[in-house]
Amino acid sequence: MKYGFPLFCLLIGLFSCSEQDETEPEMEPCEFYATGHFNDTFPGKIPELYWPCMETKDLVDAVSYNFPSLYIQTAGCCGLQSGYDLVRSKHGFPELESRDDALEHLIAKYISIDTIHYNCDLLSIQHGGFNFYTYNLEVVLAQEVFLKNATKQLKLDLLDELKIKQDLRNGESGDYACEGPTFATSRVMFFDDYQPLLDSMEHNHIIKAIVELGTINYGTDAFDAAQNNIFLLAAEYASKL
């Protein structure tokens, strides 16, 4: 009898392993993903292990839902860009950056964020809110890897939507002193070596900080002027594309 309990545990263990092997056969991640197991899963709940297996559109959704936008505003030392750099490797961006069609899907996702389908009253740290997704995507859209080889049409589409989002905010200062549309708008021109913007950076340290760091000192006349200057330059830039 003294061996009965250990033997019983051993049998239970073997039975459990057999059951697990039968119901969850060993498969490569993309093979398992292809079974459709995650078809009805909320994007933010899909494990990052399976992100390389996803279509780019679905990957953009996953990144949007998983990435905590507060980090891009406060995690770094020196503005939006340093926050992105700090958390980039932890939230699937290397995989997204490897996709040739990433920008078009990022822009499509950004356009889909509107005041009808998203709650405008939630803070930018709260999932489901207008600000959460716009801040998130604006910082992603400001990255060189997506903008450097963008087509003319993608640049125009992005600039148009950035201006729409800026106007929707009625000129109010962004959460945590961050202005995503201004940052992303400046980067479209910067990575295209648009000379009027480069000249402005040489003569205006606020514009330089916006472009390079995403740093905003809001609530001052100097900032308002710099911000307006960037959007004026963007309008001229778009007309020449």
Image (spheres, rainbow, N blue to C red):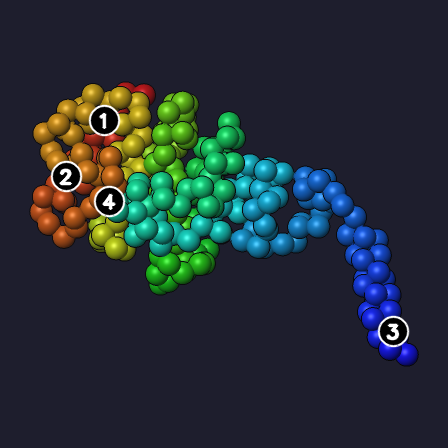
* Residues at marks 4 and 1, CA–CA distance in whole angstroms: 29 Å
How would you rate the neighbour count of disc 3 (Cα within 10 Å): few for under 14, some for 14-19, many for 20 or more? few
Residue at the spot of label 2 = 206
Which badge, 3 or 4, is on the more N-terminal residue?
A: 3
Labelled disc at residue 236: 1
> Looking at the figure, which quarter contains the N terminus?
bottom right
Of tags 1 and 3, which is closer to the observer? 3
Of tags 2 and 1, which is closer to the observer? 2
Q: Can residue 199 be seen in this view?
A: yes
Which badge, 2 or 1, is on the more N-terminal residue?
A: 2
Of tags 2 and 4, which is closer to the observer? 4
Q: Position of residue 100 (x, y in %)?
A: 51, 27
Which badge, 4 or 1, is on the more N-terminal residue?
A: 4
- Say which residue appears at 23% left-offset and 26% top-offset: 236
> Looking at the figure, which quarter contains the C terminus?
top left
Labelled disc at residue 3: 3
- Identify the image quadrant of residue 206: top left
Q: Where is residue 122 in the image (x, y as percent from the top left)?
A: 37, 62
